[in-house]
Amino acid sequence: MDSRLAVELAGIRLRNPVMVCSGTFGSGSEYGDFLDLESLGALVTKSVTLNPRAGNPPPRIWETPSGMLNSIGLENKGVERFIQEDLAHLSALELPVIASVAGSSVEEYVEVAGRLSDSGRASALELNVSCPNVKRGGVEFGLESQAACELVTRVKERCGVPIFVKLSPLVPDMGAMARLLQEAGADGLSLINTVPGMAVDIEGKKPRLGAVTGGLSGPAIHPIAVRSVWTARQQVGIPIIGMGGITDWRSALELIVAGANAVAVGTANFTDPQATIKIIGGMESFVQARGLDRIGELVGSLRV
Amino acid sequence: MDSRLAVELAGIRLRNPVMVCSGTFGSGSEYGDFLDLESLGALVTKSVTLNPRAGNPPPRIWETPSGMLNSIGLENKGVERFIQEDLAHLSALELPVIASVAGSSVEEYVEVAGRLSDSGRASALELNVSCPNVKRGGVEFGLESQAACELVTRVKERCGVPIFVKLSPLVPDMGAMARLLQEAGADGLSLINTVPGMAVDIEGKKPRLGAVTGGLSGPAIHPIAVRSVWTARQQVGIPIIGMGGITDWRSALELIVAGANAVAVGTANFTDPQATIKIIGGMESFVQARGLDRIGELVGSLRV
Amino acid sequence: MPRFEGEVLEVREYGQGRLFRVAVDSLAAQPGQFAHLLCGEDSPRTLRRPFSIMDCSDGSLGLLVKVVGEGTAWLAGRRVGDRLDMLAPLGRGFNLELYERPLLVAGGTGLAPLHFLAKRLEAAKGHSPRLLWGLSCGEDFGAMPAWLERDIDLSIATCDGSAGMEGTVIDLLGSELARADYDGVFACGPEAMLDALGPLIRKHALPCQVSVEQRMACGIGVCFGCAVKKSGEEQSYLRVCLEGPVFDYSDLAWGGDGPGGA
Amino acid sequence: MPRFEGEVLEVREYGQGRLFRVAVDSLAAQPGQFAHLLCGEDSPRTLRRPFSIMDCSDGSLGLLVKVVGEGTAWLAGRRVGDRLDMLAPLGRGFNLELYERPLLVAGGTGLAPLHFLAKRLEAAKGHSPRLLWGLSCGEDFGAMPAWLERDIDLSIATCDGSAGMEGTVIDLLGSELARADYDGVFACGPEAMLDALGPLIRKHALPCQVSVEQRMACGIGVCFGCAVKKSGEEQSYLRVCLEGPVFDYSDLAWGGDGPGGA
Ligand SMILES: Cc1cc2nc3c(=O)[nH]c(=O)nc-3n(C[C@H](O)[C@H](O)[C@H](O)COP(=O)(O)OP(=O)(O)OC[C@H]3O[C@@H](n4cnc5c(N)ncnc54)[C@H](O)[C@@H]3O)c2cc1C
Ligand SMILES: Cc1cc2nc3c(=O)[nH]c(=O)nc-3n(C[C@H](O)[C@H](O)[C@H](O)COP(=O)(O)OP(=O)(O)OC[C@H]3O[C@@H](n4cnc5c(N)ncnc54)[C@H](O)[C@@H]3O)c2cc1C
Ligand SMILES: Cc1cc2nc3c(=O)[nH]c(=O)nc-3n(C[C@H](O)[C@H](O)[C@H](O)COP(=O)(O)O)c2cc1C
Ligand SMILES: Cc1cc2nc3c(=O)[nH]c(=O)nc-3n(C[C@H](O)[C@H](O)[C@H](O)COP(=O)(O)O)c2cc1C
Ligand code: FES
Ligand code: FES
């Protein structure tokens, strides 16, 4: 691994800036058949809630032009089993693990985050305040800055690990939201979650998804992600994890040049289980060809 | 033309529900080389402002996965020349014309809308309160419901033609916004404008657009449009013109089944200048095959 | 390593179906398992497409593909020498040990995993089990019925009576169960057909293993996209790609929109 | 009706370039006009690609395409018998009447409109005007230079000296203008080359018509996407697809990022 790719994110050292997105890599071991997990920069686990959740009724996915809709609805086994089964396994790896937290109330977020922090098995937490598939809760924290900031303050009080806040691209004023979250003590931002979307079966006059609406991901949303990262970067100095529609090293570097310190690959894992490895390889070649000392030189290097 | 395709929109009779989006069809005559303009349902003209505008610095467009970014920046000749030159020409056609209005202040919108209404040459007006390429103004009306409603009230006081309000998909609560606009007297909604986006030249570390950010359109945003229309339709009874990523009769009908009374085709005109004609043909076959009396039966027919 | 790029060795056209033979290195697949195929070259489609494995022997894999949309249309255009990117074998296949006298029931391309199963059972037991196959029309799969009749113990039902018995494969199943003594059913086909299976197998108190379809993203159990409804509890789901595609019939919630919800 | 689907009649490979001959019915194109091509079949790319017309005669249209990205890569894969969907002829071409003794200057694929122009001028005036062509390396366009040398009055400059003069086409232009007497220049090529043209034509007080490139959406003047900066006023733009692609050199704002801003 080329040491020029190493980055530091809120005190966590990553061997390279290529992570995987929450919800698209399972509990980590599954993709071990396709790649060496320890060659990744970090892994973000699927969002967990306090109690197990069954998720949304099927069908849950639909392909769209250069993208896909999903309405998984946070199906997960609950934080306790997650810590005992998944985190226990993952913490044996030489790999920073960021645990994603979801909830329907401030109390639930604080409780789940607290238990994860106490477990000592997560390098950091990501607060998923923007899941478009959860009907109750979530939305208000995600789009309204006062609620989001209060949540961060409360979680920070309770936890001893860095806190990243994952935002929806629908945040009306991304720059202001980023600034206020930084002031509230967020250690970093994760941009972006899926974009609310929907598809219709015109023959059957039915929605394509059992939950009617879902979240749009994949290459289609990449320009939205780049704009979100750049807008936030104009206002804050804290680390940003950029994601949304990354498919190759070029689309990954677009987010870095726009202001992301690291990137996360989601939907592309489904298309190509080795996408992350190819992206890391492409970044190595780029850094080499450009004679850069470290990839960090590219972060926010956009000249406007 | 199959009379079963005819629809009425805020009192305006359209021979079919297929219109063209503002800014993608010029002042109307240009596409006359490729199709019979009078076979369209209606035409929406490019947004005009009080005074001429030069628009944004080049480059102004960039292709993205299943879409494109534009940052035209409302280049236009100003409302007076528009009325004298373009509207005069268009009003000779057997075709309802909806004139799109933009501005940087409530006063400008009211003034432009008033002159267009007074001209007697526009069947209706569309208030573009959501152009992502205009730096000053626009944004506040577009995302904030109180400002948007005040604008509608003021314009309605001044004008004698139906007023459609064109919204950005970034409106944080589309349902509430739609309801408030209906209460404020809007005669209809146009959903959606482009999604703010951006692309980066990683070799040159420069934005791909001279204006840095732009608006994303094309098939990539279709699921976002469907969701916006459906969400608004849950809250309002006024007509909705659905647009965003329509490429064929199927993607057009998705918006109609989700709740749109008519649709508008934008980016697809560039890919295929005859796209609208093919869509109308496809709708005719569908209505025929289904034995529908009128296409209006499909509007909002989604079963959830 | 369950990912590979296999060269297309043979393409045979059978009406709406294409039978592909793809080169694979030392792959051990069980009947009921599937391959997850990337469709499109330069900018491939975001989601892979799942297809049951129809055969796995002699360093090659057989797939039966029917064109229903853009992904399968692309596949249908592949020629000998082209390469296919696939993840395989995935999922949990049929349990061959559970029944002594099994009956196999297929609808449309549901034939693929059951043909594979029939050949494996034949190899294990020395004789071919009976396979019932339902089609809309005898022409749907071109010369395939004729070929299969020579190959396995096959009965056909067509809705228009153009081949075999006139009626659905469920009608055929009814008369077959009345006629002979079976102790278990293997089935694969459209959801409506599988749903209609229920009353018959319950009437004859037969256990049944069924292979079902659902849209997939990852194909390996990580995304929870391929959920189907579990019987018994409200709001409880199973993943087709990991816990399936083969399930015990009684584990799924039939009726209504079916386990797949579409 | 400026839209048609033309059959590819011939494809010739010249190094990085492909020369296409496409069947067209009664199309009257002028040198400098362009064709706007749809790229990709099943789900074509959102934006068409503009290419200068290199020839228009005998019911066919010539295009010279260099692969630089995905759209041109798709085009390069087209074969005889395939059909291309194009809008043509579009834009405003060169005015052939303005100069008595014109010199033609091309860089790379900028050759296409100037070759067309040279042939038209030859037909009108009875002799071929001189055309200067700059390339990175003699091999870039394979056997095309050799073919052209027999066809028109051509001088070549290559950056590596592998063919013609060693140096840029601007160097070549400098010596040519010092050597002979011209009263106007026609030029097409990369923006940097066109920018470098400025001092020379001003020094020799020569009028110049230049064909420029800009990304396009509609290609017919409706979207205002293809703006380039106009000289003189701040923030004033012209549309390449409608007011151009041929402009009077002095109408555009050279220097800085160039008229195209990229
Ligand atoms: C375990 C399994 C085994 C299968 N075996 C076969 C087989 O042997 N032969 C065969 O022809 N088909 C088989 N199918 C169905 C096959 O996957 C679909 O026909 C195919 O995905 C359609 O793709 P498309 O792009 O042509 O259709 P589109 O309708 O354009 O596809 C749109 C999206 O829906 C998905 N989709 C559509 N229909 C189905 C379906 N029935 N099941 C799952 N996803 C679907 C697609 O994968 C894609 O993501 C199987 C499905 C599963 C789940
Ligand atoms: C009037 C005109 C005449 C042209 N004539 C020729 C010619 O004769 N031969 C030839 O090989 N090329 C010509 N070009 C350039 C040609 O249009 C581009 O090389 C082509 O669009 C690149 O497409 P791509 O998908 O391969 O590249 P990509 O870089 O993947 O394209 C991305 C986007 O940028 C646009 N783009 C990229 N480069 C250019 C460019 N130089 N000019 C305009 N748009 C661009 C594409 O059309 C597309 O929208 C001409 C351009 C113009 C405007
Ligand atoms: C199937 C699927 C499941 C997801 N689950 C979660 C989740 O549990 N928590 C979360 O924060 N984001 C979730 N996401 C969003 C992704 O983490 C990511 O933000 C988004 O998909 C954009 O990246 P991409 O375009 O690379 O996929 C999910 C996305 C997909 C496609
Ligand atoms: C080049 C271009 C110019 C546009 N100009 C305007 C405009 O002037 N006013 C406006 O309200 N919308 C404008 N739009 C937005 C479209 O009207 C439409 O809302 C959007 O493009 C989504 O539809 P589509 O995906 O079919 O293109 C423009 C879009 C494009 C692509
Ligand atoms: S397809 Fe992802 S879990 Fe089954
Ligand atoms: S490309 Fe649309 S105006 Fe020139």
Image (tube, coloured by chain):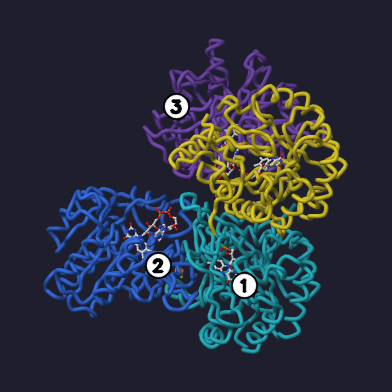
Chain colours: A yellow, B cyan, C purple, D blue
The type of residue carrying mark 2 is Gly
Q: CA distance from mark 2 to mark 3?
A: 73 Å
Place of residue D16 in the rendered image (x, y in percent of width and height, measured from the top left): 29, 49
Q: Residue A205: where, in percent of width, then height? A: 68, 54
The location of residue B224, given as percent across then percent down, is 65, 56
* Residue B148 horizontal/vertical position (percent): 75, 71
C146 up-or-down from D50: above or below: above
Q: Tag on residue D255?
A: 2
Dot 2: element = loop
Mark 3, ligand 1, within 8 Å: the answer is no
Secondary element under disc 1, as helix, strand or loop, is loop
Q: Which of the numbered marks, if any, corresponds to residue C147?
A: 3
Q: Which residue is mark 1?
A: B6
On what subunit does the disc labeled 1 rest?
B
The amino acid on which the numbered mark 3 sits, given as a three-letter code, is Trp
Q: Is residue B35 left or right of residue B183?
A: left
| Chain that bears disc 2 | D
Neighbourhood count class around disc 3 (C-alpha, 10 Å): few under 14, some 14–19, many 20 upward: few
* Circle 2 Cα neighbour tier, 10 Å, few/some/many (<14 / 14–19 / ≥20): few
- Closer to us: mark 2 or mark 3? 2
